Structure formats: C-alpha cells, structure tokens
Amino acid sequence: MQHVVQLSPLFSDAATIFYAILIEALPFIVLGVIISSFLSVFVKDAWLLKLIPKNRLFGHITIACFGFLFPVCECGNIPVARRLIAKGVPTSQAITFLLAAPVFNPIVILATYTAFGSIAPELVVLRVVVSFAIALIVGLILSLIKDQRSLLTSQFLVLCETKEHTAQSLKAKLYAVLHLMTSEVLQVFGALLVGSFIAALISSFPRETIFSYVNSPLSAIIAMMILAFVMTICSTVDAFVALGYATLFPMSAILAFLVFGPMIDIRSLSMMSTTVKPKVLIMVTAIVTQLVLIASIGYSLFGS
Amino acid sequence: MKTIFEDIIILMLGGLLVSLKLMNQLSFYVRSDYFMFTFVAGLVLVCVGGVKLVWDICGRENEHHHDHEHASGLTLLAAGIVVIACFIIPRKPLSAQTAIRRNTQNTFMTSSLSNTLISKPQGSPLLEKADTSTYTIADWISLFFSDPEPENYVGKSVQVEGFVQPHPDGTFAVARFMITCCAVDATPISLNVDSQKGSLKDDEWVRVTGVFQVKNISGGRVLVIQPTKTEKIAVPANPYFY
C-alpha cells in the first residue's frame, strides 16, 4: 500500500499506541453493547429490578456480584451500567457495579491467579476482597444522596426518560437493538478517544520519570497508582503487567496497582463521564484513592 | 440524516478492524490472542452498520420514530476523523525511538553485569546446549536474568532478528518489544552489536549472526555480539514478543 503521508517515528509511535488502545478496547465495547442492547429490548425492567434486593446493603452486594453475569472488562461494563440505570437501578448501585465488576469476575480472578498464584497467593485474595469492599463502600456512600438522578449528566437523562420499548413486533424490536448498538458504540467509542489520546501522549514520555522518586513503600504505592492511572490497561491482563514490577516494588504497591487501575484510570473516567456528572467522578476518585491507600499501607505494615 | 452518518461510521469502524486483520497488521497493535476476537467484533460492526444503513435508506416508513438518543455531532466528527486517519497514515510497529525512551534493560545490561555480582560458575544448563543460535532476543534476556555473568556467554553463537536501534557512539543494538496485551505496555529488549551502523537505517529489520564477546566500556564489562553477518529481513508477522 502506498502512503501519501510520512510521519516522524515519535508521532508514528504515538499513533500506534493510540490505535492499539482503541483496537484492544473495541471488541470488548462491542460485546458489552450486544449484551446491553438485548438487555434493554428483550428483558423487562420489572424482572431485572426484582432480581436486586430492596435493602440498601444487600442491593449493593448483589449488584457488585453482577460481574459474574457479565464477564466483560471495563470497556464492556459501561454500556451495561448505562442500561442498568436506564432500567431504574439507582446510580449508586451502577457505580458499585462499575467498580466491582472489572475485578470481581471469573476471567480476571483466573488471570490474577495465573500471574500471582505461586509467588503471592494472598495477593489474589486481597485483590478480590479489597476491590469488592471498596466498590461496596463507594456505592453505599453515594446511596446516601437522595436524588440519584441528580448524579447523571443531562444528555444521559434524556435517554433514561425514553420509555421501555413496548413495541411488540419482532421487527421493531430488532430495529431498536440495531439503533441502540450503533449509538452506544459511538458514544462509548467517542469518550474512549479522549482517554486513549491522553494515554498515548503520556506513554511517549520516558517511564523512569515516574520511578525516579521511589524510595519508600508509600512512594512505591503512589507510583504504582499513578502508573495504573496512566497506563489504562484492561483488567483482564493487568496482572501480567504487574508481574513485571513485582521484583522492583513491594507487594503492597502491586496490590495498589491491581485494585486502583481497574476502578480509576484515564479511560474508565472518560467513559464514565458519558453518564455521571464530573463532581461524581471527582468524589468517586477521591474516595477510591483514599481507600486504596489505606488498604495498601495496611498490607505493607501488617502483611508480607 | 444523523442516523445515516452513525451507520456509515459504524460500518467504517468495522471495516477498519476487518481490514487490519486481512492485511495482517493487527500484530502491530495487539497480541495474537486478540486477532479473532477483534476480527469478529469488526464483522459484527460491519453487519450492524450495513443492515441498519440499508434499513434506514429503504424502509424509513417502517420504523417507529420516537426520540431515540443519538451520539453528539462532535463525537461523530471525531470518530469519523480517527477512523479515516487510520486508513491514511502509514501503519507501523513501534520504532527504535520509543525503544530508546523506554529503555530500562540496557542500564541493567551494563551496570549490573559488573564484577560486584556473584557470578554463577556453573552457568545455566540452557547455556551448555551445543547450539544456542536458535535463541531469540527474549530467550537471551531471560537467560541474563538468571545468569548475569558475562564471561559465561563469551563465544556462544548467536543468531537473532530484530530492528536496528542506534547507539550514540555509532554502533547499534538489535532490538524487539515485549508486549503483555497491546502496544501500550511494550517494553524494549535488545542485544548490543559490536559494529558500526554503516548503511543500516534506524528501525530496519535485520538478522544478526555472530558470537558473544565481552567489551570494556567506561569501566563496565558489556556483553556484545561480534557479528559475522548482518542481513536485512522483512518485518516479521509478529513484530512483538509476548
């Protein structure tokens, strides 16, 4: 193929990284959107809501386990979470789902076990338990806000107001599925563009700059959290990436990486921003950051 | 009208994934485990976009037209530009520039290969093998981790493939990237070659044949390949190691 444009190596590499993030995420988005579109059109709201207990605590616990029903990673979870909210699930529970599902699902647990099962089995358990607990705590805190709809962006509220697809003909339902798929893929993809662009820019910087100040367990924990935020890798493979740092850093820093990354990174924040208001994102980020710090510092003091 | 644009962009997005698979260029971006998954996702997008485009153009009267949500115009524009750009710009694996920027291993190769390290006099059983020329760069690097004493490698025959990564002193290294999932997490690994770059260009793919030697460079002992032959090769089907 003849190319008209020639790029300098650094620009070309930034483009390669940018498209790599998009290409890696797209199949998961498509999978998530397929699940969520069918959920929207073929599953009755009432039936789905009956599945979730009314009790606040048990409601959040149940939804945190939904990762086992929809075993897709972060990119696939956003469309599913949007659909859950549109179906009447409180925003706080959807956030719990978003934070818990990337780790609390069979594929990710298996991947983590494969990577760390032999060298640090307690890390596998800690990752799952700590992620679950943090997702639950963040959801419960958010559930104290009375008006759950006030957490949502105005564009997303417009979608929520549209009624359940009552059209009965299969043809109409099929069209509704197709329409949801195209618009959802584009909305999530559009948000992903911003995240991938920033991640591609940042990953062109030398990585040592993050590590040059690391000289204590606490600074190692913070460095690994920054790295998780910047790298924005999928939770299905992040355990293998973390393995590469297991010789450099204490296990508490690896735990911070494995818990923080799936919840908060450039990509997940930019995709969440399609649905919830910026102030909610800041709140969630602040709470998660503190809890991850507490958990990993505790682990470095009392564990290992 | 917006609906039609949405359909076309979805169709192009799917087409992009499918064409990357068919042109064997997915390997520049993600590891081979994801190829089929990506290809199927591309086909799904092509089908969804295609069917809906035909439906929207032909059967407008059939559809119930209450207010569906749409992606914003800005999103459509950005997505369109990004997809079209990927068809226009040259697609390449990561270059030597990124290898140099991300390099952590060369510091390892020089500093920790110093005398202070406890050497393993026995060497690794893998090193005792008569023919070491089938080892890849990745094999050698993992050997260095288990046995960092450079003297144990002297005289071993090497034949490795990689791209040319220039050194400031005019020599070069033959390098590859290791990836765990996609190009985002690529980590460079390389073997130094004791030869001037000469007519070789940066990023050009080469097969270097030779034997290992130890050289004293600014007080540290460095393992280098003493090349007997350096030939240019095509970019391999999988430019990255997994």
Image: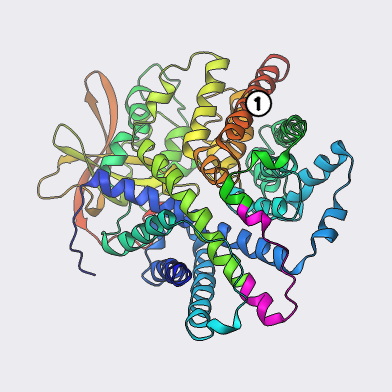
Residue at image point 15% right, 49% down: B201
Q: Is residue A168 magenta?
A: yes
| Occupied quadrant, residue A49 | bottom right
In the image, what residue occupies the spot 59% across and 73% down? B65
Looking at the picture, tell me which residue is in the foreground, B180 or B124: B180
Three-letter amino acid code at disc 1? Answer: Ile
Task: Please give the name of the residue rendered at 30% of the width and 34% of the height, measured from the top-left corner.
Answer: B101
The image quarter in which residue A257 lies: top right
Q: Residue beneath label 1, please?
A: A287
Q: Position of residue A134 (x, y in %)?
A: 72, 31
Query: Tag 1: Cα neighbours inside 10 Å, few (<14), some, or many (≥20)?
Result: some
The answer to whether residue A16 is left or right of residue A74 is: left
Q: Which of the 4 image quadrants contains residue A292? A: top right
Which segment did they paint magenta? A158-176
Residue A221 is at least partly visible in this image: yes
The answer to whether residue B210 is visible is no
Residue A155 at what x, y percent from top left? 56, 50
Quadrant of the snapshot with the C terminus of chain A: top right
Quarter holding the N terminus of chain A is bottom left
Frontmost residue, A26 versus A208: A26
